Image (spheres, rainbow, N blue to C red):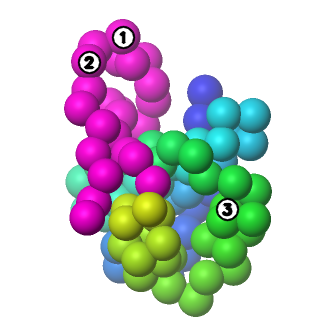
Amino acid sequence: MIDWKPVYGSSNVQAIAYDEAKKECYVKFHPNGAAYVYEGVGPGMWNELLHADSKGRFVQIQLRRAHPYRRIEDGTEADSDRPVPTRVAE
């Protein structure tokens, strides 16, 4: 179960979560609630996201460009057995 933390005042990011054991950062976006997991995110990067003035900009510049990510269904990983391509932005 993902423990989502709501993000207030962001037009792009609805909620965020972190699994320190797996080093995975979860981001749920407005308006449709599409959720993604970013892999290999250390606790320092998570802390930077928590304190970023713009969560959306941080995700675009720091997470999306440097970490493999995949979309997750309904904000859960219940469908993780289904093959989902991992993408890394250039």
Inspect the image, locate mark 1, and give the three-letter code of the amino acid beneath it.
Answer: Asp
**Mark 2 neighbour class, 10 Å CA radius: few under 14, some 14 to 19, many 20 or more:** few
Q: Earlier in the sequence, mark 1 or mark 3?
A: 3
Q: Residue at x 41, y 77 (%)?
A: 61
Q: Which residues are magenta?
A: 67-90
Toward the top, the furthest residue is 81
Asked if residue 44 lies left or right of residue 67, the reply is: right
Q: Residue at x 67, y 62 (%)?
A: 46
Residue 13 seen in the figure: no
Q: Name the residue tied to disc 1.
A: 81
Measured along the vertical axis of the image, is residue 66 above or below residue 19?
below
Compute the Cα span from label 2 to label 1: 6 Å
Measured along the vertical axis of the image, is residue 4 above or below residue 1?
below
Q: Quadrant of the N terminus?
A: top right
Q: Earlier in the sequence, mark 3 or mark 2?
A: 3
Q: Name the residue tied to disc 2.
A: 83
Residue 48 image point, x, y percent: 68, 74
Residue nearest the viewer, comparing 32 with 36: 36
